[in-house]
Amino acid sequence: MEFEKPIAELEKQIDELKKMADDRSLDVTNEIEPLEKKLGELRADIYKSLTPLQRVQVARSNRRPLTEDYLRLCFTDFIELHGDRAFREDAAIMGGWARLDGETVMVIGHQRGRDTKENLRRNFGMPHPEGYRKALRLMKLAEKFHVPVITFIDTPGAWPGLGAEERGQSEAIARNLFEMSRLETPIIATVIGEGGSGGALALGVADRVNMLENSVYSVISVEGAAAILWKDGKLENRERAASALRITAPDLLELKVIDAIVPEPPGGAHANHEATAQALQKVLLEQLDELRGLKPDKLVRRRREKFLRIGQFVE
């Protein structure tokens, strides 16, 4: 990313110095320590002042930890479940049983790829209707066994192709919204990257909604908003759209669309997957402790009230 170039240049200097030290068997600890300190400060400074559009770029980075990474770093004993029992398996959504600090949970999340081959298999994290129906099947299974549901949101949006529309894309999303609003088990949703439109919301009706510090959550992409509002997707219009949409975690916390921001390490989640996963795991455990004691009817009532409070209207 353009704004990360000073970081990349300093990292290159440090790597070259280390390589030279290895080749010549030299001790360059005194030279490297100040550079690494400067690198940490530079990362913190750059990421402290990101614009909304730059946060969109960070959220879309294929170097960020994905659902699969959090399953490995935050959970144990993951058993993946497949298919919607109606059409086919959709690799854009993955889910199954897992343990969080020893407690059984159902984890469901969008899954992108890191390279072209994996992105094609995962359809760039854009689910078809069968993906949402699989997610709902797993949620209902969790409800049957009184197990909490944890979802990870990371998608540009639901797949808009002809086949998806023919198989009821809008109905599948609407059904998830309806069923999640009355699911009698705790639900915690976390936006880990890009949360786009109804494709994200289909996993987002939860008792607690979190966002990673540099993730985004929006009804439309900045490119789409710029094209609609200003008939032009050039950079300055994308900047205007990103600011106007209020898509960043601090904005959405202020608007009470989300409940918590999960801090990322200096340089973003992609700079340190393990530290990000630890921060997220801490938040998930705290929220599960809060929700565990609530009776199902109270849980559902609070969840509905939470979403009804969002927004303002004037008659």
Image (cartoon, rainbow, N blue to C red):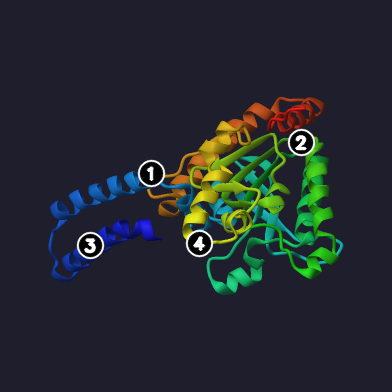
Which residue type carries mark 2? Answer: Thr
- Per the model, the C-alpha gap separating discs 4 and 3 is 34 Å
Q: Amino acid at mark 4?
A: Lys
Q: Spatial distance from mark 4 to mark 1, Cα to Cα?
A: 22 Å
Residue type, mark 3 in image: Gln
Image quarter hosting the N terminus: bottom left
Q: Nearer the viewer, residue 277 or 57?
A: 57
Q: Secondary structure at mark 4?
A: loop
> Can you identify the residue that label 2 sits on?
185
Query: Distance between the Cα atoms at labels 4 and 2?
Result: 45 Å
- Whether 255 is drawn above or below 189: the answer is above
Residue sitting at x 56%, y 34%: 253
Q: Residue at x 45, y 52 (%)?
A: 54
Helix, strand or loop for disc 2: loop
What's the residue at 62%, 58% (across, down)?
Answer: 224
Q: Which badge, 1 or 3, is on the more N-terminal residue?
A: 3
Residue 241 shows up from this direction = yes
Question: Which is closer to the viewer, label 4 or label 1?
Answer: 4
Q: Residue furthest right?
A: 86
Q: Which residue position holds label 3?
A: 13
- Secondary element at tag 3: helix
Q: Name the N-terminal-most of marks 1 and 2.
A: 1
